[in-house]
Image (spheres, rainbow, N blue to C red):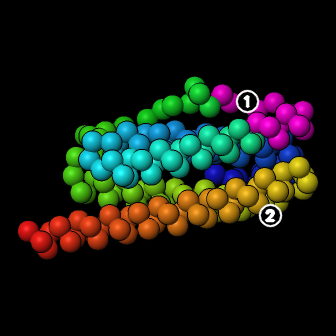
Amino acid sequence: MASATALNSLPQDQLSLAYSQEAQELCRYRSLTLCFLTFDSPVSQLMNAIGIECEYRLNNLKEVAAQMAFDLPLNSSKLMDIPSSHKNSRHFFVVDENRGRQLLIDAEQAAKASCLMFGRLLKINAAPELRQLLAMFVKQKNSEYRVLKECREQWKLAFHDLGCAS
């Protein structure tokens, strides 16, 4: 997340921070795509679509970094790692309602934190080359958070309705 040092950081540091954050999110959404694949394919498809949006944002960051003659230290294609929430779990895949609900809660919380982090980056940004890009990211991150919140709420209702129908 955005640290206190980001308040005094240079545009290159802000780019690196944004890129690192987005690369982590791409990994998380790829993992969530797989987790829900066997249990709820529409949620899996949603996570995949959000992951694709992360890829677009990473490419946008690369383009701006190139325009500003900055090098980004990370290669997103080599970042696929299993998030810590899966390492301590008995199951990687969603096998029941409780596991799915917890993953959706975690995804929603992470999306909210990401939205706040990009909002802070936008506030402290002094580089005109980054302003429009960060403003667009904040808008997209707000939408991402709302979509995940709605997904979690609808998912909860769907399982509640199934329980009542039995």
Residue in the foreground of this view, choosing between 5 and 125: 125
* Residue 32 visible, this angle: no
Q: Where residue 154 appears, x then y in whole percent?
A: 35, 68
Indicate left or right for 116 with 96 as reference: right
> Judging from the image, what secondary structure is the residue with disc 1 in?
loop
Q: Where residue 94 appears, x then y in whole percent?
A: 28, 46
Residue 73, numbered label = 1
C-alpha separation, residue under disc 2 versus residue under disc 1: 24 Å
Q: Is residue 75 above or below residue 92?
A: above
Residue 14, numbered label = none
Q: Earlier in the sequence, mark 2 or mark 1?
A: 1
Q: Is residue 95 magenta?
A: no
Q: Where residue 9 appears, x then y in whole percent?
A: 84, 49
Q: Is residue 151 above or below residue 16?
A: below
Residue at the spot of label 2: 123
Residue at 52%, 67% in the rendered image: 146
Disc 2: CA contacts within 10 A as few (<14), some (14-19) or many (>=20): few
Residue in the foreground of this view, choosing between 91 and 88: 91
